[in-house]
Image: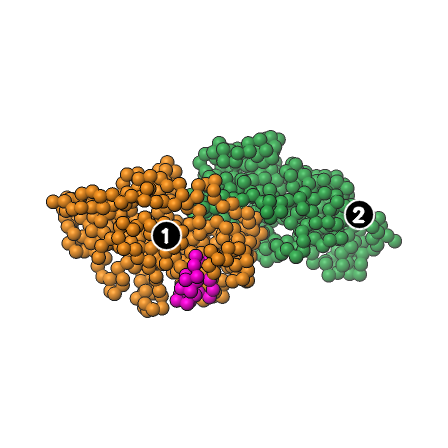
Chain colours: A green, B orange
């Protein structure tokens, strides 16, 4: 017996924004039985994350992420349901997540015995929304918490933090955590609606719409006249350049991502002119990749996810996590474009099935 | 009684390289007696350091350094002889240094009682060349040692360090210290003669002439195929950009200076395009200003200068410090231009008197 399968396949390396030309939806057939010692999964939800753009590259270029192989379905963090199990420890109807991002972007996925260690059952959701396991309790939550508290810390009450892409999956967690530590929190976001969201719902002290207030030097002067103690940067480019000049002496920058630069060829990238400020203002800039922690430091992962779980359970109204769920695999590429251009409202997720 | 004095006066704010138009030699008269409770000094040697370019600015711009006041003689680290003393603790013929850079660039300097704390007698030179007190045992030595060992450390034997301006006052100390710690040491320098100096006399493993090998990406590929673990940067600009792309994962950058950018207006500065590598390669970049340590941490200063004194005394042939001494105050501005354009061969010093 076979099932009709559909997959988002990496067909062509994009130069700019990926389209359905690069990521077409392809039909195929898949056995309805799990392989020997393995699983057959039905994909329920997948996470869309900016770093995936970096996987869509010439495989000869080495970076922190594995390149997507051409001609194969792409993959990332996801939540699936076991529909057939020949593996001990998994039974039909179990829900599983892939903490290493090995959920394939197909309606159904065959998991061999070798691949089993990359999947973990979710045994007890205790009222936690299922999608949280690929959001605030998944890679974005781990990224936000670990980088802010462990890499950027110790945080001091009264310090000012600027968060870029502040309404995004990572930004909204960073901002709320910083508020819990008594910081003044300012966000840069891509729409007036997001300004309202982060200030009125998440409790940010201020935020600006970078599509409207395009002089970032002036925006920082206006919203952060005291200068930044910490910049949690998801965006890179001209905002990073402006912050270099507007940091307080001994300011810190946490380099988490640079989404403004991902769709540009190296020669098209923005040239930052204020690096001289790194020593003039005695700045510390730390880059990190959360995969290092996921792979190399399971103790920290456990601790951080434990802390986030407590926050989420304690009072669901006090610590928010907004999700932007797109329905249907056929709309995935458009949703990914939206993520890369700042059109998503919260954590970007695509629902494949109920 | 008066003495004929001559001074280098800050007369005009330079836009590019300072000339004698901005820093003329001006004659005046000075009393041959010390002021009440103070000293009259004859200047013997002064230090020329790149940071001085930053003091020649519009005083409304705040940076780590005090701006030079227009119409007054400039100042920096120096060595002087007491020719008249009305201060206790100082007698005629004593040699004094100014650890805070308060030696005025004049043949004679009157030090008031209020200014006395900025001057320290050098009591025992024990065979140490006098000029070392404004070089390896002064600000450049402190800068090199503190930043490499305390800020950039811990150093691991087998790591590779790239030092820019490697034949300069700071670079030559950094390179030799790194060799003592078992690192592979590579330098970027401005002439073939300097390549010879750092490789044959200082023991660097490799070096290149950046005026000849102008493609810095290719130069790093050639001389540091393994990538940099540490970049001790005195230069900034395009070399810093290239290192961002050529660092090893988890590489460190010590941002000590950016001499390639000091004579440029903000809009003329080089735009670095590789900042995305900060997170991709998980880099740590630390900027520092040694003045913070001089003013705020006298214990560290004492420790570091103590360590350097031991190195210098132990074996004068094993730990070298090359100086480039220009004779005469009338040649100072030309010597400063040479420093800013990489023409000096070692620590830049001007001799005013024997």
Residue sitting nearer the eye, B165 or A158: B165
Q: Residue drawn 40% across and 59% down?
A: B167
Around disc 1, counting alpha carbons within 10 Å, would you say few (fewer than 14), some (14 to 19), or many (20 or more)?
some
Instruction: Check disc 2 and report the residue beneath it.
Output: A26
Bounds of the magenta segment: B188-207
B60 lies left or right of A278: left
Residue B197 lies in the magenta stretch: yes
A23 lies left or right of B332: right
In the rendered image, which quarter is residue A325 located in?
A: top right
Q: Residue drawn 30% across and 55% down?
A: B326
Q: Residue drawn 39% across and 45% down?
A: B17
Q: Chain of mark 1?
A: B
Residue A201 appears in view = no
Instruction: Check disc 1 and report the residue beneath it.
Output: B338
In space, the residues marked 1 and 2 are separated at their CA atoms by 65 Å
- Residue sitting farthest toward the left: B1
Residue B351 lies in the magenta stretch: no
Residue A179, placed above or below residue A33: above
Q: Chain of mark 2?
A: A
Labels 1 and 2 positioned on one and the same chain: no
């Amino acid at each position: 017996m076979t099932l009709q399968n559909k997959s988002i396949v990496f067909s062509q390396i994009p130069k700019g924004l990926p389209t359905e030309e690069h990521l077409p939806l392809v039909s195929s057939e898949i056995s309805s039985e799990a392989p020997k010692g393995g699983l057959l999964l039905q994909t329920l939800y997948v996470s869309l994350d900016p770093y995936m753009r970096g996987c869509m590259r010439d495989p000869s270029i080495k970076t922190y992420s594995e390149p997507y192989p051409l001609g194969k379905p792409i993959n990332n963090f996801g939540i699936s349901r076991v529909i057939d199990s020949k593996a001990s420890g998994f039974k039909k109807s179990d829900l599983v997540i892939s903490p290493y991002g090995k959920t394939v972007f197909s309606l159904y996925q065959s998991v061999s015995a070798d691949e089993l260690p990359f999947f973990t059952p979710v045994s007890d959701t205790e009222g936690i929304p299922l999608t949280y396991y690929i959001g605030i309790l998944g890679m974005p939550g781990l990224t936000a918490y670990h980088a802010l508290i462990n890499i950027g810390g110790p945080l001091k009450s009264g310090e000012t933090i600027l968060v870029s892409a502040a309404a995004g999956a990572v930004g909204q967690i960073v901002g709320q955590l910083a508020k819990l530590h008594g910081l003044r929190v300012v966000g840069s976001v891509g729409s007036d609606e997001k300004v309202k969201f982060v200030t009125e719902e998440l409790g940010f002290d201020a935020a600006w719409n970078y599509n409207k207030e395009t002089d970032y030097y002036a925006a920082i002067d206006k919203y952060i006249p005291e200068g930044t103690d910490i910049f949690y940067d998801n965006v890179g480019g001209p905002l990073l350049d402006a912050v270099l000049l507007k940091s307080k002496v001994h300011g810190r920058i946490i380099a988490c991502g640079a989404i403004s630069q991902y769709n540009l060829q190296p020669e098209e990238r923005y040239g930052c002119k204020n690096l001289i400020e790194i020593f003039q203002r005695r700045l510390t800039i730390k880059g990190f990749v959360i995969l290092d922690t996921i792979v190399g430091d399971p103790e920290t992962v456990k601790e951080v996810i434990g802390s986030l779980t407590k926050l989420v359970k304690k009072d669901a109204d006090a610590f928010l996590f907004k999700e932007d769920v797109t329905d249907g695999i056929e709309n995935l590429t458009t949703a990914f474009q939206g993520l890369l251009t700042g059109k998503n409202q919260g954590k970007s997720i695509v629902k494949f099935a109920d």
